Image: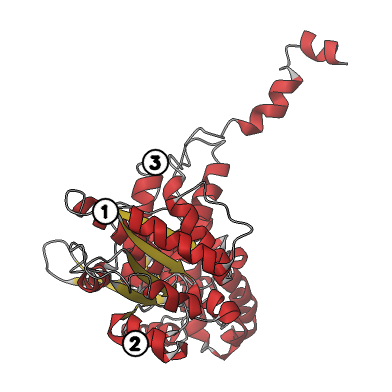
Amino acid sequence: MLKRIFNNGWRNPSDVMSGYLDRIGAGYVIKDPGPLDFDYVPENIVGREDFQNKLAARFSSIDKPETSCRAVISGPVGSGKTVLVKTFCRDLKRHLANRREIRIAHVNCRNASTSTRVVQRILHAIDPGHPDRGLSMGELLLSLRKLTRRNSAHLIVILDEVDHMLRKSGDDILYQLLRIDEDQEGKGTLSLILISQEQIIDVLETAVLSRMGKTNLIQIPSYNEDELYKISKQRADLSLANGSCSDDIIRLIAQKSAPIGDARLAIELLKAAAEACEIRQDDHTLREISADDVHSKDKELSVDIVSEIDALENLQPHAMLVLLAICRRLRKESSMTTGDVENLYAVVCEEYDEKMKSHTTLWKYLKELEKRQLIVTRISTVTGGRGRTTHLSMPHFLPSDIAKRLEMLVKKQF
């Protein structure tokens, strides 16, 4: 059988079998996957510049040998707490390179959720060969005290997701770390940064709180749409091939992530859409991420907010026609203008042999659809500063799903 295939000029079966792997490493769309990783630390962070300044203010005297500093960073999932601290510590090391050596011990307390494991991780950060078994907490702390005093570098300990450790082991280890320089005047060997989703200031013992200081709390909110847009654009510019991701697609990703303000969701959605585009590169003319690539990942990533699809039958008949016109365009495009809506609404009315409503009524329908969160509008200034254009998108739902439901409902109405 194989001889007959070869004699007929067919390809080697091994080539056929491995052909589907040709796209691996080809970089049609994804040229560098690194920036699409949650743990990637960009050279410059976007959307958190104000909080960089606040953190720097808490460490304004860190260049002095006798100084130790503290900060507590609190905020919801995906609000940029960890990347804020990582970039700050990296930049601080560079800034003080000729004045004070800085060493960093970053411990994720979700993985090291007991005080013993936390101290072991800190010791490993400054002495990779330090034994992590057979030592009591007292012996571990003694080793830490000796190592920090023997080394001229200043140690910044970052306890990420510290609420996991506090629930399991309490805050005594925080008290011990804060007292590590107590018997040596004129030298600060250790600074402490706590990161938590939860508000931990209120659960700390009085003795710990008095040393951490309530004023050292920095509370970070969820990202807004513009900040998510900046983050998505930065990651796209760093990771994707030129021309593969339009500004409209980046805006769509930001809009989809905005209801929960989670940068991780925006990055994951960008990555998933890029991978979906990469997969269909058998046709080398389609090397640009489409709205379908983004929409197709909604259900997998649980992007949708509370569904309004079941309430579509409550729309007025012509509002259904307007929404149907919008859905048909947004199946393939990431956004459209109100002018596009009016033109496509006219086409749909002709299809159903209906007379168009007035421009004012159409505008009221659009406002109702926006109120129901079925569409999102964004106003942009026309180049040159004259006039404004309203752009519509549907970031929270799949246009194809709503279109199918509407086509069934419209048949009953007309």
Position of residue 338 in the picture relative to residue 21 (left or right): left
Residue occupying the point 39% across, 82% down: 366
Residue 293 in the image: state x and y as whole percent: 52, 55
Residue occupying the point 43% across, 41% down: 32
Three-letter code, disc 1: Lys
Residue 327 in the image: state x and y as whole percent: 50, 69
Front residue of 139/44: it is: 139
Three-letter code, disc 2: Ser
- Identify the disc placed on residue 93: 1
Could you classify mark 3 by the number of other residues whose Cα lies within 10 Å: few (under 14), some (14-19), or many (20 or more)? some
Q: Are marks 1 and 2 in contact (CB under 8 Å)?
A: no
> In whole angstroms, how far apart are the C-alphas of marks 2 and 3?
51 Å
Front residue of 201/153: it is: 153
> In whole angstroms, how far apart are the C-alphas of marks 1 and 2?
28 Å
Q: How many marks?
A: 3
Front residue of 139/219: it is: 139
Residue 155 in the image: state x and y as whole percent: 34, 60
Q: Earlier in the sequence, mark 2 or mark 3?
A: 2
Three-letter code, disc 3: Ala
Query: Which residue is disc 3 drawn over?
Result: 241
Q: Of circles 1 and 2, which is in front?
A: 2
Position of residue 152 in the picture relative to residue 332 (left or right): left
Residue 5 in the image: state x and y as whole percent: 80, 15
Query: Which residue is disc 2 drawn over?
Result: 210
Residue occupying the point 57% across, 73% down: 402
User: Helix, strand or loop at disc 2?
Assistant: helix
Q: Of all residues shown, which one is farthest toward the top? A: 7
Any part of residue 334 in sight: no
> Please, is residue 276 above or below residue 366 in the view?
above
Residue 17, by quadrant, is: top right
Could you classify mark 2 by the number of other residues whose Cα lies within 10 Å: few (under 14), some (14-19), or many (20 or more)? few
Could you classify mark 1 by the number of other residues whose Cα lies within 10 Å: few (under 14), some (14-19), or many (20 or more)? some
